[in-house]
């Protein structure tokens, strides 16, 4: 069985290490024989701002309540082409990987806006379909990210705190919420402080992991520690 993988990426600089990780991941997965689709949000000029532009349908023209509009759009096929395309990619994939730089202890605005627009009520959650009963139950997701600070800054005793506690709102509040099983994150700490050789080693380590990603078991988000 060929695994279907969606890579969702954002960074403003095409020469960044994040872009190198995105490109290396795409090649490694394709070389392994997986079916790969990508959402390069920077190249797509994806609009992260939610509003009536999310829809071609209208439920209430006088008051915009996004969740009610999402429910209506789900019923009548009323999502904009941009949003519909991204929802269909998630529905298609077996594994979704997000590639991004950790900014202010969270997702960069464009990737967060992608979640805001694409994780639509009715289509991706709602009606009791959350967590273990979520719409995407049986699918897996993984975060691949870089940090500005070194690894020791992201331990329980470090000055930034435990990286896994930092990532929990994403792991639990976004991915698990809509049903995904979560794989251990791929984290490259402070690539800006590395030599070129070290960065290449990190890319190859990532590629090697991805060749065996089909056999990885999900983590328990609430208990995952270093």
Image (cartoon, rainbow, N blue to C red):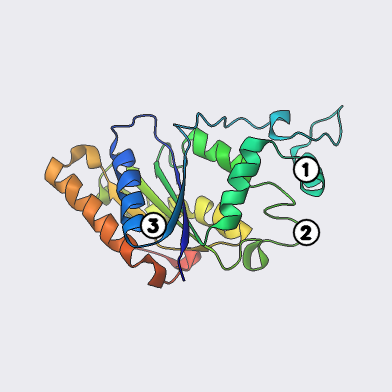
Using the rendered view, name the quadrant where residue 192 is placed.
Answer: top left
What secondary structure is marked by label 1?
helix
Q: What residue is drawn where x is 69% and y is 29%? A: 53
Which of pointers 3 and 1 lies earlier in the amino acid sequence? 1
Quadrant (top left/top right/bottom left/bottom right) for the C terminus: bottom left
Which element type, helix, strand or loop, lies under badge 3?
Answer: loop
- Give the Cα separation between the discs numbered 3 and 1: 33 Å
Position of residue 9 in the picture relative to residue 52 (left or right): left
Rendering quarter of residue 113: top right
Circle 2: element type: loop
Residue 96 relative to residue 135: left or right: left
Circle 2 residue? 127
According to the picture, the residue beneath numbered tag 3 turns out to be 185
Q: CA distance from mark 3 to mark 2?
A: 29 Å
Report x, y in % for residue 8: 47, 45
> Mark 1 — residue?
73
Q: Are marks 3 and 2 in contact (CB under 8 Å)?
A: no
Residue at 79% from the left image edge and 47% from the top image edge: 71
């Amino acid at each position: 069985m060929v695994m279907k993988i969606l890579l969702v990426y954002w960074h403003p600089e095409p020469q960044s290490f994040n872009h190198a990780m995105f490109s290396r991941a795409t090649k490694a997965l394709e070389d392994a024989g997986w079916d790969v689709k990508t959402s390069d949000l920077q190249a797509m000029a994806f609009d992260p701002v939610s509003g009536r532009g999310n829809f071609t349908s209208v439920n209430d023209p006088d008051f915009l309540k996004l969740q009610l509009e999402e429910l209506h759009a789900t019923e009548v096929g009323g999502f904009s082409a941009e949003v519909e395309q991204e929802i269909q990619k998630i529905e298609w994939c077996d594994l979704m990987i997000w590639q991004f730089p950790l900014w202010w202890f969270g997702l960069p605005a464009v990737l967060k806006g992608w979640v805001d627009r694409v994780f639509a009520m009715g289509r991706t959650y709602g009606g009791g379909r959350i967590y273990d009963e979520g719409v995407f139950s049986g699918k897996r997701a993984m975060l691949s990210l870089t940090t500005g600070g070194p690894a020791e800054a992201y331990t329980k005793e470090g000055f930034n705190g435990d990286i896994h506690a930092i990532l929990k709102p994403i792991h639990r509040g976004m991915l698990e919420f809509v049903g995904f099983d979560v794989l251990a994150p791929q984290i490259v700490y402070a690539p800006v402080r590395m030599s070129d050789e070290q960065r290449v080693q990190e890319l190859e380590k990532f590629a090697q992991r991805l060749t065996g990603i089909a056999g990885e078991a999900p983590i328990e988000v609430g208990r995952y520690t270093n």
